[in-house]
Image: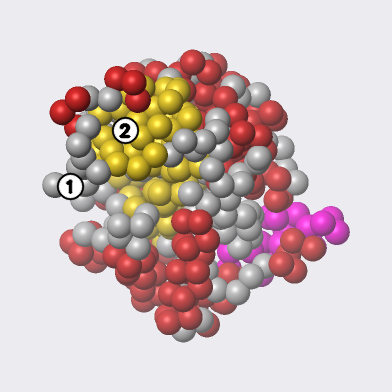
């Protein structure tokens, strides 16, 4: 093991308070900032963090570098993206600006099914190339842990290929960024199937059984929404996933309250995401659970829709994360820090809640409980900012 010291940061934002509170009811003090701070790590874990004036005597001889004027935070986590896709949907964005609605566009042949067509027409090489470019852009934004969902193949062969492609990205970028591979074959129902149940039977269920032994999938996800998949589909998918020891996630309560959050909690899902219409009952169930509520403000900005009532979740004691939802149709933006910094005033989040949402809670939304804070024993995953305080980072709205 190589031991390294990084010394004299203007600030290290440890998130210790947030970690102790398990990401709930966070105050600004829970950033637990150490000033004039240093850190000692090896490849596997954080060994020590503290004020430089208390730097341990026995480590004074190890190689070290000084980072005065810089701020270190837990590595940023983007816990919800759909970045493997072909084509673009710029035309739909203009259509929506001119008055069309997302669901109307989807039911008239646009939307997810249009991206399915473009994705399936792209060669595997091309898809891999554009996906690598997108991951590189995200790395440049300081993200250290990234979730990528499949879901634009929508038939057995293509979805298999997309999950494998995400597996390849995971290997290719190992050491630079940790990638979590989420299986979202239940993203939309192609026209040739007469119901979501039929598609589940023909594609999603057999494919999950095929992929599980290959150990390339980290979680399953489903678009639980009218016109997409219903609670029977969610139950079927989650029961199978649990039997296979694979974690569950869902897109829930986005267009209406269909008790999606409650169902996710019932299955101890890692997260449920969107949650624009979740009822107080769903919020209370989330608060009593370990399921993270992932809010996606970029989608509201991009679609011109209302935002989730973040305060209701936060005040109830729910673990709240923020993610980019980067995808071609409902949020073509890959910058999770920008999203969080822009959304925080609307969400009425304090600075501790904001950082917790893109570090600790976002890591928990991926089942990664050993990251998201800078505490001895945890995984050394950090983002370094050319800023002398964490206030400057959010004030710059996502500039690294
Ligand atoms: O999270 N809701 C489903 N999936 C994406 C949208 C994907 C698309 O429009 O292509 C989302 O918003
Ligand atoms: Fe999504």
Answer with the quarter of the image where residue 109 lies.
Answer: bottom right
Q: Secondary structure at mark 2?
A: strand
Callout 2 environment at 10 Å: few (<14), some (14 to 19), or many (20+)? many
Examine the rendering and report whether any part of residue 309 can be seen: no
Instruction: Please state the total of marks drawn on the protein image.
Output: 2
Q: Residue at x 75, y 54 (%)?
A: 101
Examine the rendering and report whether any part of residue 95 can be seen: yes
Residue 111 colored in magenta in the image: yes
Residue 305 vertical position relative to residue 228 in the rendered view, above or below? above
Residue 85 colored in magenta in the image: no
Image coordinates of residue 389 in percent, x first then y, are: 55, 30
Left or right, residue 179 beside residue 304: left
Between residue 69 and residue 48, name the one nearer to us.
69
Magenta stretch in the rendered image? 95-113
- Disc 1 and disc 2: Cα gap in Å? 14 Å
Answer with the quarter of the image where residue 291 lies.
Answer: top left
Q: Residue at x 58, y 50 (%)?
A: 335
Callout 1 environment at 10 Å: few (<14), some (14 to 19), or many (20+)? few
Q: Residue at x 66, y 40 (%)?
A: 396
Task: Give the label on residue 2, or none.
Answer: 1
Task: Give the label on residue 39, or none.
Answer: 2
Answer with the quarter of the image where residue 350 lies.
Answer: top right
Between residue 376 and residue 30, name the one nearer to us.
376
Q: Residue at x 70, y 30 (%)?
A: 346
Secondary structure, magenta segment, majority class: helix
Q: Secondary structure at mark 1?
A: loop
Task: Give the label on residue 314, or none.
Answer: none
Left or right, residue 115 beside residue 169: right
Disc nearer the start of the sequence (1/2): 1
Image coordinates of residue 261 in percent, x first then y, are: 47, 33
Image coordinates of residue 279 in percent, x first then y, are: 57, 26
Image coordinates of residue 78 in percent, x first then y, are: 47, 47
């Amino acid at each position: 093991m190589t031991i390294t010291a990084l010394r004299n940061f203007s600030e290290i934002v440890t998130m210790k308070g947030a970690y102790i509170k398990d990401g709930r009811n966070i105050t600004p003090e829970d950033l637990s900032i150490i000033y004039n701070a240093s850190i000692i790590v090896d490849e596997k874990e954080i060994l020590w963090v503290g004020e430089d004036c208390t730097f341990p005597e026995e480590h004074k001889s190890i190689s070290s570098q000084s980072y005065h004027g810089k701020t270190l935070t837990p590595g940023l986590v983007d816990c919800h993206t759909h970045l493997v896709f072909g084509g673009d949907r710029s035309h739909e964005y203009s259509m929506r600006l001119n008055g069309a609605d997302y669901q109307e566009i989807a039911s008239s042949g646009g939307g997810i099914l249009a991206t399915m067509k473009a994705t399936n027409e792209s060669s595997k090489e091309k898809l891999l190339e554009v996906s690598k470019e997108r991951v590189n852009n995200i790395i440049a934004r300081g993200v250290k842990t990234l979730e990528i969902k499949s879901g634009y193949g929508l038939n057995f062969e293509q979805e298999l290929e997309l999950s494998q492609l995400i597996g390849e990205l995971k290997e290719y970028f190992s050491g630079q960024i940790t990638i979590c591979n989420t299986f979202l074959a239940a993203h939309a129902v192609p026209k040739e199937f007469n119901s979501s149940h039929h598609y589940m039977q023909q594609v999603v269920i057999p494919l999950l059984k095929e992929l599980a032994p290959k150990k390339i999938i980290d979680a399953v996800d489903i678009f639980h929404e009218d016109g997409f998949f219903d609670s029977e589909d969610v139950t079927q998918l989650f029961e199978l996933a649990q039997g296979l020891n694979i974690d569950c996630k869902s897109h829930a309560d986005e267009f209406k309250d269909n008790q999606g959050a409650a169902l996710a909690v019932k299955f101890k899902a890692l997260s449920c995401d969107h949650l624009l219409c979740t009822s107080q009952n769903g919020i209370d169930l989330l608060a009593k659970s370990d399921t993270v509520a992932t809010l996606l403000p970029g989608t509201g900005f991009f679609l011109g829709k209302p935002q989730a009532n973040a305060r209701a979740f936060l005040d109830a004691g729910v673990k709240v994360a923020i993610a980019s939802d980067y995808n071609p149709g409902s949020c073509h933006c890959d910058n999770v820090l920008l999203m969080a910094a822009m959304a925080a005033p609307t969400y009425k989040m304090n600075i501790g809640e904001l950082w917790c949402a893109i570090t600790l809670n976002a890591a928990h939304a991926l089942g990664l409980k050993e990251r998201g804070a800078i505490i001895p024993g945890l995984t050394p995953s950090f983002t370094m900012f050319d800023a002398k305080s964490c206030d400057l980072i959010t004030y710059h709205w996502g500039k690294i």
